[in-house]
Image (tube, rainbow, N blue to C red):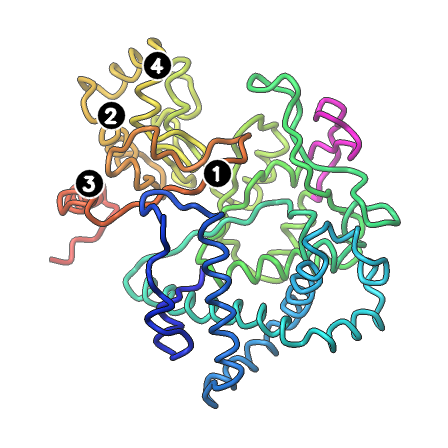
């Protein structure tokens, strides 16, 4: 997200234009309210930059556009056509634009150069701000983990610009889409709807698109968590006409070939494998063959007995352990709705009286063998279900939680520091 105050420091926005948004709730993001407010100001900043930008800034912008042209040109063109076509799905655009006729694209680009420039300006502004933040973090010993979902959205520049790499018909519509089969949580499975890859076409290119995607992610992040890692071993393919995921079938993924291509192009792979859900031996073999750390979630640990895979005494060093992820309830929220069996088992296993379950869970993770442990901020503060980040399977009200600095107290940092030092997760430099 572009910081508008930074654009104001460049002289491209005024203080009056940064007045607080009327009706804004500091605790929850209202995207419907925020988006038009921000787009309007980004357009103002873009117009002033192109009209009055200094020579140094213009040169930096031009260099960015040149270096990122492999994806930026398609992205800016996609966004501009999308806006022109009232954000209809790209397969419903005029056929020459949907099928990427070179003459039609060139003519559209010539007639809409200012709007294309606006979308490039937004990406340039974000990029320069992001890398300043990353530099600040890295200089202080903080590494940033990003997320790379295995699939991409149909309505995206990725699919429009590389139609040959996806399971599409001759009109550009998906023929097979992603999902997962029926399981304990859903009798009909989950129908995600993302277009699936034509892995044979990726193989012919030496996985060039995937390599560029991963390289780009690793420029922005120090590590990446690859979502739905099991899909690289085998994935659930559902006919695009299906109403539920029941009609799908397992199909073989790229397996070793993709990760060998990554190694040849990138070297060491700073990747976390999201290996949750129904994991089969071939998924474990793929993960371990490339020495990728998997994930362990403590909230999943207490539903059975001491043999549970997610209990800390089963952890290996090459894993990443969480109290819960963005898809889980907060630890306090989980505890408030946990079954009697879970609570009884947790009392015995954690050896505690039920107070501050979040810190009990943080403590036992810190003491575990896992090389990396992650605690959601909601668990550090001790917040309940009202502050949950995401509810899987729902499309409303997610990713809207915000914290404020008055929720943070010095003892939060002191306690984390003490635990990290006690469990050799921090070097004492005092």
- Is residue 192 located in the magenta-colored stretch of the structure? no
Q: Quadrant of residue 330?
A: top left
Labels 1 and 4 touching (C-beta < 8 A): no
Residue 107: where, in percent of width, then height?
80, 75
> Which disc number belongs to residue 342?
4
Residue position for label 3: 419
Q: Looking at the image, is mark 2 or mark 1 earlier in the sequence?
A: 1
Q: Looking at the image, is mark 3 or mark 1 earlier in the sequence?
A: 1
Residue range of the region highlighted in magenta in the rendering: 234-254
Q: Nearer the viewer, mark 3 or mark 2?
A: 2
The Cα–Cα distance between marks 3 and 2, rounded to whole angstroms, is: 16 Å
Residue 229: where, in percent of width, then height?
58, 40
The Cα–Cα distance between marks 2 and 4, rounded to whole angstroms, is: 12 Å
Residue position for label 1: 294
79, above or below 189, in the image = below
Q: Residue at x 64, y 52 (%)?
A: 260
Q: Nearer the viewer, mark 4 or mark 3?
A: 4
Q: Residue at x 72, y 51 (%)?
A: 88
The Cα–Cα distance between marks 1 and 4, rounded to whole angstroms, is: 24 Å
The Cα–Cα distance between marks 3 and 1, rounded to whole angstroms, is: 23 Å
Residue 277: where, in percent of width, then height?
54, 28
The Cα–Cα distance between marks 2 and 1, rounded to whole angstroms, is: 24 Å
Q: Quadrant of the C terminus?
A: bottom left
């Amino acid at each position: 997200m572009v910081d508008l105050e930074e654009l104001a420091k460049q002289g491209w926005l005024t203080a009056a234009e940064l007045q607080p948004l009327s009706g804004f709730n500091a605790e929850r993001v209202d995207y419907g309210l925020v988006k038009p407010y921000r787009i309007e100001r980004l357009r103002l900043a873009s117009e002033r930059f192109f009209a009055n930008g200094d020579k140094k800034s213009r040169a930096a912008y031009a260099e960015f556009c040149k270096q990122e042209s492999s994806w930026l040109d398609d992205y800016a063109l996609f966004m501009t056509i999308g806006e022109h076509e009232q954000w209809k799905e790209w397969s419903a655009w005029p056929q020459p634009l949907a099928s990427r006729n070179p003459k039609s694209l060139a003519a559209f680009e010539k007639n809409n150069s200012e709007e294309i420039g606006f979308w490039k300006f937004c990406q340039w502004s974000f990029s320069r701000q992001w890398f300043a933040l990353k530099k600040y973090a890295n200089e202080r010993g903080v590494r940033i983990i990003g997320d790379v979902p295995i699939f991409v959205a149909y309505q995206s520049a990725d699919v429009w610009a590389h139609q040959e790499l996806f399971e599409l018909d001759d009109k550009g519509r998906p023929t097979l889409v992603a999902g997962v089969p029926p399981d304990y949580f859903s009798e009909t499975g989950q129908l995600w709807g993302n277009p699936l890859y034509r892995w044979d076409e990726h193989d012919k290119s030496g996985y060039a698109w995937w390599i560029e995607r991963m390289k780009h992610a690793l420029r922005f992040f120090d590590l990446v968590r690859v979502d739905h890692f099991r899909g690289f071993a085998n994935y659930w393919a559902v006919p695009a006409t299906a109403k539920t995921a029941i009609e799908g079938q397992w199909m073989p993924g790229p397996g070793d070939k993709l990760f060998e291509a990554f190694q040849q192009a990138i070297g060491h792979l700073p990747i976390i494998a999201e290996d949750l859900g129904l994991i089969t031996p071939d998924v474990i073999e793929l993960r371990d063959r490339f020495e990728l750390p998997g994930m362990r979630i403590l909230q999943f640990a207490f539903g059975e007995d001491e043999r549970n895979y997610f209990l800390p005494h089963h952890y290996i060093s090459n894993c990443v352990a969480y109290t819960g992820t963005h898809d889980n309830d907060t630890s306090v929220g989980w505890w408030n709705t946990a079954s009697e069996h879970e609570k009884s088992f947790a009392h015995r296993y954690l050896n505690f009286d039920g107070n501050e379950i979040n810190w009990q869970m943080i403590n036992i993770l810190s003491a575990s063998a896992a090389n990396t442990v992650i605690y959601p901020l909601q668990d550090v503060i001790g917040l309940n279900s009202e502050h949950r980040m995401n509810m899987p399977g729902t499309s409303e009200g997610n990713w809207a939680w915000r914290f404020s600095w008055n929720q943070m107290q010095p003892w939060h940092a002191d306690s984390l520091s003490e635990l990290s030092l006690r469990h050799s997760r921090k070097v004492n430099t005092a």
